[in-house]
Amino acid sequence: MNEGSFGRRISFDIQAHCAFPGQLGVIMEISPVSLKILTVLRQSGTDVSGEALCRDLAISRAAVWKHIQVLRGLGYKIESATHRGYRLSESANYPYPWEIEPLLNTQCFGREIQFREVLDSTNLLAGEAAKNNAPEGFCVIADRQLRGRGRLQRRWFSPAGKNLYLSLILRPSVLPAAISQISLVAALAGARVLDRELPESKVEIKWPNDLLVDGKKAAGILCESSSELDRVHYAAVGIGVNVNLEEVSLPCDLQGLVNSIRLAGGREASRPRLTANLLNTFEPLYQHWLQNGLADLLPELERFSALIQREVEITTVRGTIEGRVLGISSDGGLRVKPGNRTEEEIIYCGDTRLLA
Ligand code: BTN
């Protein structure tokens, strides 16, 4: 779908409003009637006559046609032929709330999803929503980000129609010092999802927040929070996953360095299904972490780790350390034995680079 097509269609049927002025884009929602038509077409799997749709929904033929146009504008491929009616030939591969919600088995994560075609950054909007009392589990998803953010002021390449850009609001009752552990819990959820999705590939977590597929970055986590001395107000956990990104659409500086589910698996992946899998996997891990901390999750985190027993260089605010990674500590730090010392050191914040 080309950019801007939402805008033209939106005026008819999609209810659009902007809850947080100043942000780009509009909230995309589908009307109950359009959704009903979509459901009927999907369930039938074959041609459905316009007449049947008019009768079942108690609307005119012209209204049916307009709803079909709205659905097409949203990316659903719907064929129509005289005397045969309408047939859904291909679903829209967009992480729309109405596609994700039926696939969720969560209590709280993703139970409220705000989807926008374009945003500066989902983390930015999630942070604003959190300040406006959005509940835990509230999710912001965009199809495209104009200023996708990575850690350490890096940018996150966020083209339209390809990937997943999601930010989730959490309100954990933990001390602010523990908040960075959420990145690891989210990374573990992401690793489980990618591992299931790509059984032929090697999925790894590069502490603290990178997810690698066959050695190349395929996803990243950016956890931003607001807290007082002894209380966390909220954390906005931003997750970016390269889903259907192709090599040709990469800017020069990223070519050869990043991976995607499509590149590794050789076929297009469903963005709504992947989003639901991620939320379904993350929620129980988060609940477990809230109750028990990281300790039980360490063996799996270490199993997925790209750094374990490897020589690394870690850049921290206090300088650069070289050493061998021994593991992850129960409070989320990286256990390193620097080359020139006998005792281990625990690093809580830094950028890691494999040396050998
Ligand atoms: C990193 O690897 O440095 C973290 C990348 C995080 C990217 C995601 S995409 C959704 C959310 N919105 C952002 O602006 N960033 C995060």
Image (cartoon, rainbow, N blue to C red):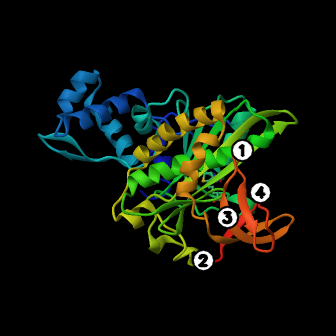
Q: Are marks 1 and 2 in contact (CB under 8 Å)?
A: no
**Residue, x 81% and y 70% (percent of image)?**
341
Q: Is residue 286 above or below residue 73?
A: above
Q: Is residue 31 visible?
A: yes
**Residue, x 72% and y 47% (percent of image)?**
180
Which circle's residue, 1 or 2, is located before the other in the chain? 1
Q: Which residue is mark 2?
A: 253
Which circle's residue, 1 or 4, is located before the other in the chain? 1
Task: Between label 1 and label 3, give the one nearer the viewer.
Answer: 3
Q: Which residue is mark 3?
A: 325
Which circle's residue, 3 or 4, is located before the other in the chain? 3
| Figure quadrant of residue 194 | bottom left
**Residue, x 43% and y 38% (percent of image)?**
100
Which type of secondary structure does the marked residue at label 2 adopt?
Answer: helix
Task: Between label 4 and label 2, give the one nearer the viewer.
Answer: 4
Spatial separation of the CA atoms under disc 1 and disc 4? 41 Å
- The amino acid type, in three-letter code, at marker 4 is Ile
Task: Between label 1 and label 2, give the one nearer the viewer.
Answer: 2
Which type of secondary structure does the marked residue at label 1 adopt?
Answer: loop
Q: Which mark is residue 346?
A: 4
Q: Which residue is mark 1?
A: 22
Q: Is residue 71 left or right of residue 191?
A: left
- The amino acid type, in three-letter code, at marker 2 is Asp
Query: Within 8 Å of ligand 1, the CB of disc 2?
Result: no
Q: Are marks 4 and 2 in contact (CB under 8 Å)?
A: no
Spatial separation of the CA atoms under disc 1 and disc 3? 44 Å
Which circle's residue, 1 or 3, is located before the other in the chain? 1
Specify the quarter for ligand 1: bottom right
